Image (spheres, grey):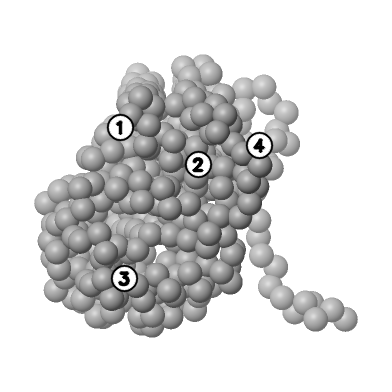
Amino acid sequence: ESLFAELDDIPLDPHYALKEDFSADPSPSKVILGSGIYRDKNGKPWILPAVKEAEEIVKSSEDSGRYDYLPIPGYAPFYTAARDLLFGSLSSPEDNFVSVQTISGTGANSLGAHFLSEALKPSAVWLSNPSWVNHANIWKSVGVPVRSYPYWDPERKALDFEDMIQIISQEATPGDVIVLHGCAHNPTGLDPTKDQWRTIANLCESRGLFPFFDCAYQGFASGNLDEDAWALRHFTSRGSMELAVAQSFSKNMGLYGERVGALHFLTASPDAARKVKGHLLRLQRGLISQPPKRGAKIATTILKDNALFPKWLADLREMSSRIKCMRQALYDELISLGTPGNWDHILTQIGMFSYTGLSPEQVECMRTDGHVYILSSGRISVAGLNNANVKHVAQAIDKACR
Ligand code: PLP
């Protein structure tokens, strides 16, 4: 008898299960709109032209030490440039910040959760309902009770802001952590307005909640890096709160598999920053020892090269504007088919994802009748749409809604 015989069976992660089912489907017209990976207008992976150039520059400067370890906190030019991209011109003294390179956004969320669970011993972490599925997984694994605040209103297919504020004000306790999506909320594609962000910041301040921003899509939502960092910078400009940020370059540089990201803390004093850094490095040592080098060098080259940086901005605009066009195309097809229901939210949502509001039964129908594969939550990755498949997807949605 195995020591593991009593373990629960864990179902395959829904993204991987979806991919497996999709691969096994022989239909030539099949479409998958699952993972958040950008695809170009031909449905192919897209290596950003700025990344291609940066690869060449990195290659030409490589020496025999290229496979050496990085230090435990990672590549310093990377995590300082990454910090400045997020926070803009620093509104607090530089010594109050702590930055560590991580295994992309997932690693940043995970390292942050490990640290905050030990340092703050929060009675709960508050996640939006729904949130990126891995948030709950990460926080459960560090033993912090997961609570959720209302976010998606299925009736109105809009942000449930009043309930969100009410539940947090009534039920969150000082010292709790609240996870906030910096922009392009995954999975709903709905972001608070600037006024709503001000209210959320007031609430965090008055209730003594610790804001943990997850910024996986900076530049990908509006196409503008500063606009997409507005919420975070609003919090920091108040000068009243300590906070953390998990940052990913998977989407905005298309460096998915290179695992490029960082975890940042803004603390109230240089002494606090020094202590936080010590604990983050202790945890990092135990979890991964040192982060990987190559992707961080590519990202740094783009962030610091005056000729390359504007090319990256153009790449971001290309991706975000193609996604916007595909939202419009899907909307137009649904309207011309007269598909029952209101589809305005497809246009008002932003970023890579759209929460369609389709039920699990409708999602199943799209798969069996239309060979269109989306998550049972009804989330579609708009980046997977293109001129060749959008009509087919709209027809599958239409059929499922009748
Ligand atoms: N956070 C959010 C909200 C995400 O949507 C994702 C990716 O889908 C991530 C973090 C982490 O991605 P990665 O680990 O590839 O940076």
* Residue shown at 49% from the left, 78% from the top: 143
Whether tag 2 and tag 4 are in contact, CB under 8 A, the answer is: no
Question: Considering only order in the chain, which callout, 4 or 3, is on the residue closer to the N terminus?
Answer: 4
Give the mark nearer the N terminus: 2 vs 4: 4
Q: Nearer the viewer, mark 2 or mark 4?
A: 2
Looking at the image, is mark 1 or mark 3 earlier in the sequence?
Answer: 1
Mark 3: secondary structure: helix
Give yes or no for contact between labels 3 and 2 (Cβ–Cβ under 8 Å).
no
**In this rendering, the label closer to the viewer, 4 or 1:** 1
| Residue 379 point in image, percent of width and height | 45, 43
- In this view, the residue farthest toward the front is 64
Earlier in the chain: of badge 4 and badge 1, it is: 4
> How many residues crowd mark 1 within 10 Å: few (<14), some (14–19), many (20+)?
many
Q: Which residue is mark 2?
A: 297
Instruction: Report the disc number at residue 223.
Output: 1
Q: Is residue 320 visible?
A: no
Label annotation for residue 273: 3
Q: CA distance from mark 2 to mark 4?
A: 35 Å
Is residue 309 found left or right of 344 in the rendered image? Answer: right
Determine whether label 4 and label 1 are within 8 Å by CB. no
Q: On the image, numbered disc 4 is attached to which residue?
A: 22
Cα–Cα span, label 1 and label 3 = 32 Å
Three-letter amino acid code of the residue under disc 4 = Phe
The foreground one among 318 and 191 is 318
Residue type pointed to by label 2? Lys
